[in-house]
Image (cartoon, rainbow, N blue to C red):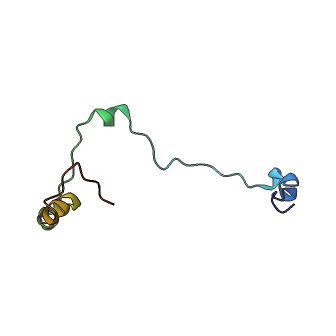
Amino acid sequence: MADKPDVTEVTTFDKTKLKKTETQEKNTLPTKESMSLPQSHPTLPPAVATAASHCETATEAILRISPALNGSQVLD
């Protein structure tokens, strides 16, 4: 009967030996006031913004490499 788990330890477990702990919420939900504040997006440092502007997306790369492909063809 190796396909069934051994639950003998679970049946003899004593919950009274556990230590009491106090749970602290780390990720609190936003308040109604904070939700009503305008959201500002962080700006990228100039070096990162410049580097990102020179990046090519995968779609742009595919279109540059294979201009003959169109939406009716399926890639394998």
**Residue 58: x, y in percent?**
23, 61
At a point 52% along the width and 47% down the height, the residue shown is 25
Q: Nearer the viewer, residue 25 or 68?
A: 68
Q: Is residue 42 left or right of residue 3?
A: left
- Asked whether the viewer can see residue 22, the reply is yes
Picture quadrant where residue 62 is located: bottom left
Vertically, is 35 above or below 61? Answer: above
- Quadrant of the image for the C terminus? bottom left
Picture quadrant where residue 59 is located: bottom left
- Quadrant of the image for the N terminus? bottom right
Q: Is residue 18 left or right of residue 21?
A: right
At a point 63% along the width and 49% down the height, the residue shown is 22
Q: Nearer the viewer, residue 56 or 11?
A: 56
User: What is the tally of numbered marks visible in this picture?
Assistant: 0
Vertically, is 56 above or below 28? Answer: below
At a point 29% along the width and 58% down the height, the residue shown is 75
Q: Is residue 33 left or right of residue 16?
A: left
Picture quadrant where residue 17 is located: bottom right
At a point 85% along the width and 59% down the height, the residue shown is 9
**Residue 68: x, y in percent?**
14, 59
Q: Is residue 26 left or right of residue 53?
A: right
- Asked whether the viewer can see residue 55, the reply is no
Q: Nearer the viewer, residue 67 or 7?
A: 67
